[in-house]
Structure formats: C-alpha cells, structure tokens
Amino acid sequence: MSIGSFAAGARLIALLAIAALLGSCAKPANTPEATVEAFYALRIESKVIGVPTAAELKAFAPYLSEELRGLLEQARKRHDDDVARTPADKPSFADGDLFSSLFEGPTSFKVGADEVTGDIHRISVQLAYDRQQPVMSWTDKAVVKLENGKPIIADIEYGGNWEFGNKGALVSMLKNALTPAVASEILGEWTIAGHRIPGVSAMNDAQAKALHGQALKYSPETASSGKDVCPHAGYKNRRENATGFLAAGYRTTPQALDLQTGEGRIEVTEVTCGGVPWPTLGGTLLQTGKRTLAPWNGVFFELQRR
C-alpha cells in the first residue's frame, strides 16, 4: 500500500469514528434538528477545505441528499481532473468552505429556529469564526427534507452579508460552477420560431406549426418545455461531425436543414433530468453558427432566444 493510500485510509477511519461518536451523542437521528446538529459538528471536527475528498464525503454522506452528494462527487472529479491535466495550476474547488458563507468556515455553531413549509424544513444555524477579532458571526440555513424516510440536508442557504462570501445556496452554486461552458450558451429562455421536416416524421406540418411560440427555459437547476418541467436539470455537451451525426441519428444532412456548419462540426447538448435523458421537445439541442435546433419526432424545431 502506498503512503498516500495509507493516509487516505487513516483519514477515512478517523472521520467515520468522529461521525459515529457524534451520532451517539446527538439527539435521536430521526429529526431534522438532529441531522443538522450532527452534520455541522462533523463539519467543524473534519476541518474540510474546498470540495470534500472521497473519504470526507463518505463520512458526510449519511446527512446529505442524493442530489447534493452527486454534485459534490462531480465537483471532486472536476478537481481531480484539473490536477491531472494541469498540475502546476490551482484546481477547481480547491479553496474555501462550501458548507458556509465564510471562506474560512466556522469554528462553532448553534442550531436555531426551524421554519417549516410543507415537507421542507429551513433550520437556522448560527455560526461563528473566532480565529480573528472581532469574532465573525452569521446565520446560514440548512434545508432539510425527507429522503427514503430519513431527514437529510438537501441544500444550504448562505446568509453572510459581506462582499466576498458565498452567496445564494450551495446546490445552485455547484450547478453553476459545474455547468460546462458550451451549456452556458443555451441557458435562458427560448421560443419555437419555425420548423423543418427533412424526411419521415411522426408529426405533420400542421402539428409542428401548432407548437410555434412554445417557450423553452433552461437554467443550471431546472428546465421547462411548455408544460413539461424538469426540477433537476443537467447538461451533457459534445462536438460531433455534423454529416455523420445527422446521418446516423436522424437520417438527414446539413444541406437538408440548411445548416452552415463551418468546420463541419455541430455542438450537441443533451439535457438530463434527475441524471437520465429528458425525453421531451428540447431535450436535445443542436447548435451551429447562430442557429439552435431542437429535433423532436422527426421535426427540427428552430429556436429563437427571447
């Protein structure tokens, strides 16, 4: 076993031991307050910096939602990929506390009031950092919901009011940071402005025309196409040879779609919903030059940014 592997294993054992000890001292773990109490106690004991390592995330996992764990795993992968690709540069998610408003992170906490809206608990957490004078103090909120019958932290809303603190909420910050550059070009609101049917289609011209004017919206967190809404959107991007891609996937050509593909390439964005392909109009987007198309049922809908 390498020294690095031994150190990682020892750190994991230490973190799990801390988590077990905290769990035995906390209130019953079936309440939102107990989950928040145990999570922040572990956060302060672990002194995690930047995105958690695999060992740290394993210790935090019992307190976090599947979505939040998945985003943190993606952030860790981005960090490790950056290190492997450009070891001389600072990698993504290397510095600062993701779990609070303050870059340095808290040194103490106190669980406060619980605001309940339906099944969602927003629990205030009074945080402090005492490594400087005067002591900094602020209040963040842990968003807790039930998942598989167990209260877990689904998000953290930042409450710090200083200029350089984390703003907004943890989930949206991670999604914004992890959204690929190509995907950022499709974020926003679009309208179906036209269509082209280059071959065999499950829709006729009148049916396709009836969809003109439909709105499509894409954000780092959600996507919507007409009345079809995805609450947990993701984006996967790739560049394809336009001729080969259109022939294999749609049995058509760039010429049939009147596409000017420049170097013969086309940008493809696949929208996912909850980690799986989103099977709706606007679930796949094709971009080349200034044109954006949404292929659906054999029809290529022309999108216009609103």
Image: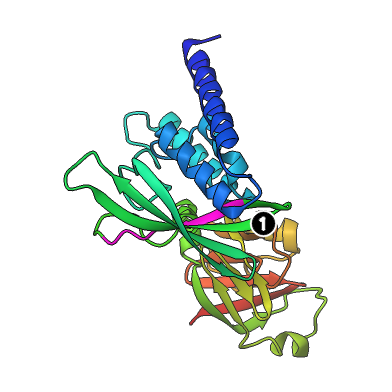
Reading the image, the residue beneath label 1 is 146
Mark 1 secondary-structure assignment: strand
**Considering depth in this image, is 8 or 209 the residue closer to the camera?**
8
User: Is residue 97 visible to the viewer in this orientation of the structure?
Assistant: no
Q: Quadrant of residue 157?
A: bottom left
Specify the segment rendered in magenta: 152-161
Give percent across and percent down for residue 114. 51, 62
- The question of residue 18 being in magenta is answered with no
**Relative vertical location of residue 75 with respect to residue 255 in this rendering, above or below:** above
- The question of residue 157 being in magenta is answered with yes
Q: Amino acid at mark 1?
A: Leu
Q: Residue at x 49, y 73 (%)?
A: 188
Q: Residue at x 39, y 34 (%)?
A: 47
Q: How many marks?
A: 1
Residue count near mark 1 (Cα–Cα under 10 Å), binned few <14, some 14–19, many ≥20? some
Q: Quadrant of the N terminus?
A: top right
Q: Residue at x 73, y 84 (%)?
A: 208
**Considering depth in this image, is 282 or 286 the residue closer to the camera?**
282
